[in-house]
Image (spheres, helix red, strand yellow):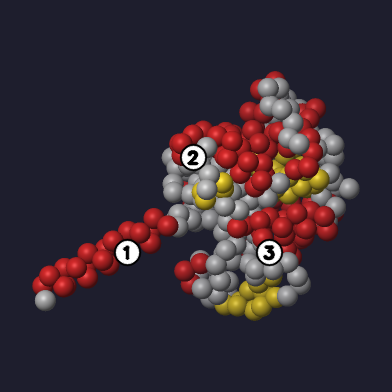
Amino acid sequence: MRIVLLSILSFVFTFSVFAQSTDDARPVVDDSKTTPAQVRDPKLPTLWIVGDSTLNSNAPMRGWGQELAQFFDLSKINVVNRAIGGRSSRTFIYEGRWDRVMAEIKKGDFVILQFGHNDVGKYDDPASKDRPSLHSEGDEAVEVKRNADGKLETVRSFGWYMRKYGNDVKAKGASMIFASMVPHKDWADAKIVRKEREKWVLWTANAAKATRAAYIDLNELIALEFERLGPAKVEPLFADRRTHSTQAGALLNAQMVVAAVKSLKTPDLKKLLSKRADPIQPAPKTFVANLK
């Protein structure tokens, strides 16, 4: 009996460790421990970066938004990273973050926005921390009571939230650039698995088209670069099992953003890039769609 019990306990422990290792933690960053990035020179246009922890993370993780400013001439443009860990297309709005960005955006500014990682899960599952949107792109909505504060909230589809972002930016006379979510480090036969393309990537592209915004298929650009490098060289680019990057990974992802920016005709950010961006070759034009 004791041997059987020990075997069961060993199995439970092993399964628990396995379960924890199969999905990366998606921590919600505490507001009290962060200071939102500010506009340095109000006379200049500003590039606003909006998204989750894959754009802005605490060490040892790092997001690509934290590496992007070096590729812009900061005497010509401000780069302000308002991305924050644990946020989704839904929570960035209901927490009031988007309203605060919109209060500061002015005509001639730019926004680059990426969501998807924290929109997964079921919208009313307590374990999902009130983050998921509805997994669709229509106008459907459900009324829910949030687990965190008990307040009623109308939860919309991922596509609805993304269209709102695009329309809000356009109404301000600013330029929106949607970026599809960075890929996970999931390999199969030396290829990156791209399950997110069926939902979040597609819906992001559709939101860009619906709101006549620019679009960067960052998901595919990075996945192809990972495949070119191979698993051994990609491994050090990640700070956890499959989602969050190290500084080296964040730098590579930021370079992919710059490559795409160089291929965009509208909005034209090329003239605002720094000398550090010179060695980066433009991405194939098939990976971008211009603002209309």
Left or right of 234 on screen, residue 81: right
**N-terminal label among 3 and 2:** 3
Residue at figure coordinates x 50%, y 70% from the top left: 148
- Please provide percent x and percent y for residue 106: 80, 44
Which amino acid lies under the numbered mark 2 shown in the image of this protein? Pro
Front residue (pair 177, 189) = 189
State the image coordinates of residue 273 (x, y, percent, origin top left): 73, 27
Q: Where's residue 54, x and y in %?
A: 56, 47
Q: CA distance from mark 1 to mark 2?
A: 26 Å
288, above or below 268, in the image: below
Rounded to the nearest angstrom, the CA distance separating label 3 from label 2 is 31 Å
Circle 1 — which element? Answer: helix
Which residue is the site of mark 1? 15
Residue identified by numbered label 3: 158
Left or right of 164, for residue 149 = left
The quadrant in which the N terminus is found is: bottom left
**Circle 3 residues within 10 Å: few <14, some 14–19, many ≥20:** many
Sequence-first disc among 1 and 2: 1
The kind of residue on which mark 3 rests is Phe
The structure residue drawn at horizontal position 64% and vertical position 33%, both measured from the top left corner, is: 255
Would you identify the image quadrant in which residue 59 lies? Answer: top left
Q: Residue at x 44, y 49 (%)?
A: 241
Q: Nearer the viewer, residue 259 or 164?
A: 259
